[in-house]
Image: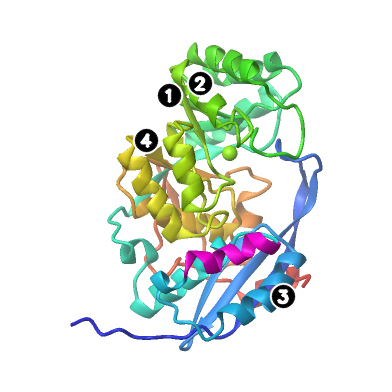
Amino acid sequence: MLRKRSMKLGDLKVHTLAIPLREPIQFSWEPFPHPVYVFSIVEVEAGGFKGYSAIEFGAAYKHFLETTVKLTIQGLDIEIEDVDARLLEVGSWAIQRLGALEVAIWDLIAKREGLPLYRLLGGGRRKVKVYASTGRLLSAEETVKMVEKYAELGIDVVKLRFRRERINEDLEVLKAVAREFSDVKISVDANQAWSYTPPYWSRKKAMKVAKELENFEVLWLEEPLWKDDVEGYRWLRENTSIEISGGELEHGIQRFRMLIEGGAFDIVQADAVYSNGIQECRKVAALAEAFNLKFMPHAWDPGLGWLANLHLAASLPEKLCPYIETPLDPLWWNEVMFGVLNGEVELEKGYAKLPEQPGLGFEPDEEKMKKFRIA
Ligand SMILES: [Mg+2]
């Protein structure tokens, strides 16, 4: 009989860090450039183990977790099925969902079991193919240069951002990449589910773009419409051969069910730390599989958040989840992803190798964190 090793959740801390960037980074989906990148590392403790995770929120997130959430969860059993979805929902009520906390609990459980998280989840993939996700609206020439670096790493899919004022400007960049790299396939992200900044696309504009993308055999078009326009998503899917993807900002199994049943996506892109966590994402992945869709997690997260999505991907069949999104922008990759951790993921011939240490594989380094701590 399996011995249940009960552990109660103890302390919950959040370390808020600000990492200076070599130059301010302007993402396509935000109206302002980041001179520094602010994010939080979540730390949970139980039975002498510590579990970690990370998400891109700052001091308000820290405050909420260290007050309301801490008081709500302290003393609860950490077995993941006992971490009720409604408990994780307490996050949305005030500030954000609590996927990052759920991931830190997974990290802790995997350490207790002495297994890398993906193996605890039943996964057998030692490496997952990465696709290079660009984040900035660079010129055609700058984009080609960046893709050249990715191709040298053996990467065969790159995601471009389409958020310039005119579609033709976006298309010029895509054409330049398609012309230069016959072995690199392209996907396109319009980030229309984000409410931050124009241009906002109509259904007709999204269709016009999809039709253009058909000529370049683009792999998928991501978030071409506002996230609540389920009918629009379905209409688009039914009228273009380009696969339509989305779901990175969503949380809650019923919401995913509504989107999937509504025919919104060919590829579902839940994120382990933006949603209610790995457990929810695995249920969403199963739902996607049952509907003959693909599941590929969104993963533009600081190091430990990205790692959570890597383990999630490695726990799923390759057919269902062929790639992990990887933010390889040189302004971002080393400093923000691994700058405060005690190790770094190896990329090899287009794959990310799964760390074999227990848990997520890497932990924050106290000394390194000290340098960047703001709260
Ligand atoms: Mg996206």
Q: Of circles 4 and 2, which is in front?
A: 2
Instruction: Please say if 157 is above or below 108.
Output: above
Circle 3 sits in a helix, a strand or a loop, which is it? helix
Q: In which quarter of the image is the C terminus?
A: bottom right
Label of residue 235 in the image = 2
Q: Where is residue 334 in the image (x, y as percent from the top left)?
A: 61, 54
Among the two numbered marks 4 and 2 on one chain, the one whose residue lies closer to the N terminus: 2
Q: Name the residue under label 3.
A: 370
Label of residue 183 in the image = 1
Circle 4 sits in a helix, a strand or a loop, which is it? loop
**Mark 4 residue's CB less than 8 Å from ligand 1:** no
Q: Which residue reaches farthest left?
A: 1
Q: Mark 4 points at which residue?
A: 293
Among the two numbered marks 1 and 4 on one chain, the one whose residue lies closer to the N terminus: 1
Q: What stretch is highlighted in magenta?
A: 84-94
Q: Distance between the residues labelled 1 and 3?
A: 43 Å
Among the two numbered marks 3 and 4 on one chain, the one whose residue lies closer to the N terminus: 4
Residue at (39% x, 57% y) in the render: 354
Q: Residues within 10 Å of mark 1 (few under 14, many from 20)?
A: few
Type of the residue with mark 3: Lys
Q: Position of residue 312 (x, y in %)?
A: 41, 55
Instruction: Please say if 68 is above or below 219.
Output: below
Q: How far apart are marks 2 and 3 (CA)?
A: 51 Å
Front residue of this view, candidates 367 and 91: 91
Front residue of this view, candidates 228 and 56: 228
Type of the residue with mark 2: Trp
Q: Where is residue 371 in the image (x, y as percent from the top left)?
A: 74, 71
Type of the residue with mark 4: Leu
Among the two numbered marks 1 and 3 on one chain, the one whose residue lies closer to the N terminus: 1
Among the two numbered marks 2 and 3 on one chain, the one whose residue lies closer to the N terminus: 2
Label of residue 26 in the image = none
